[in-house]
Amino acid sequence: MKKQSFKKQLTHLLAVTVLTASSLGGITLIASPTVSAATVSTSKIKLNEKDAVKKFHKQFKNTKVDEIQLETKGNKFVYEISGTDNQKEYSTDIDAKSGKVTNTKSETLENGEQKTNLDLDKAISRKQANKIAEKGR
């Protein structure tokens, strides 16, 4: 397994904090690998954010995404995506290398509970965020 330099990993960690603007105009963290990501090669990420969202929507039709995170679990990167419809909140984990859905769950929303949905048209990719972070160093 090819290991990336600490400098590249740090750039990656900085990049994921600037990925997208939400529909409210604020910064939304669309991906946030934990510090343990320094031991996991980002070359293992084969699935991009948009394809992960497509897989989520295939699993949970008629939902709006309110959160996307790219986390490390063991030696893998996993997209954690959550969204809602009018009655329930849904979440799923998707392996960022294989694209396989590894975990799903749903729960009923409490009366009056609302989530802020992401404007996915304003989201930038993880690769674009990496470029922005590299320019800023």
Image (cartoon, grey):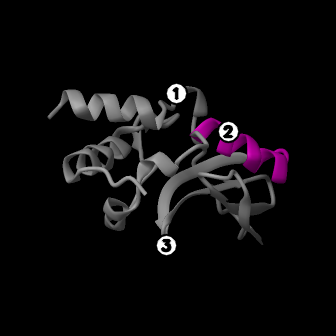
Residue underneath mark 1: 122
Disc nearest the viewer among 1 and 2: 2
Residue at coordinates 66% horizontally, 45% vertically from top-left?
52
Comparing 22 with 51, the one in front is 51
Callouts 1 and 3 close, C-beta under 8 Å: no
Comparing 107 with 73, the one in front is 73
Under mark 3, the amino acid is Gly
Q: What distance separates the C-alpha of mark 1 from that of mark 2?
A: 15 Å
Comparing 90 with 1, the one in front is 1
Residue 93: quarter of image: bottom right
What is the span of residues highlighted in magenta in the rendered image? 49-63
Q: What distance separates the C-alpha of mark 1 from that of mark 3?
A: 31 Å
Residue 57: quarter of image: top right
Callouts 1 and 2 close, C-beta under 8 Å: no
In the rendered structure, the answer to whether residue 103 lies left or right of residue 123 reads right
In which quadrant is the C terminus drawn? top left
Residue underneath mark 3: 74
Residue at coordinates 37% horizontally, 61% vertically from top-left?
37
Asked if residue 6 is positioned above or below residue 135 in the image, the reply reads below
Mark 1 surroundings within 10 Å by alpha-carbon count, few (fewer than 14), some (14 through 19), many (20 or more) = few
Secondary element at image label 1? helix
Asked if residue 131 is positioned above or below residue 14 in the image, the reply reads above
Q: What distance separates the C-alpha of mark 2 from that of mark 3?
A: 22 Å
Determine if residue 60 is in view.
Answer: no
Secondary element at image label 2? helix
Q: Main secondary structure of the magenta part?
A: helix
Q: Return the mark for residue 51.
A: 2
Under mark 1, the amino acid is Lys
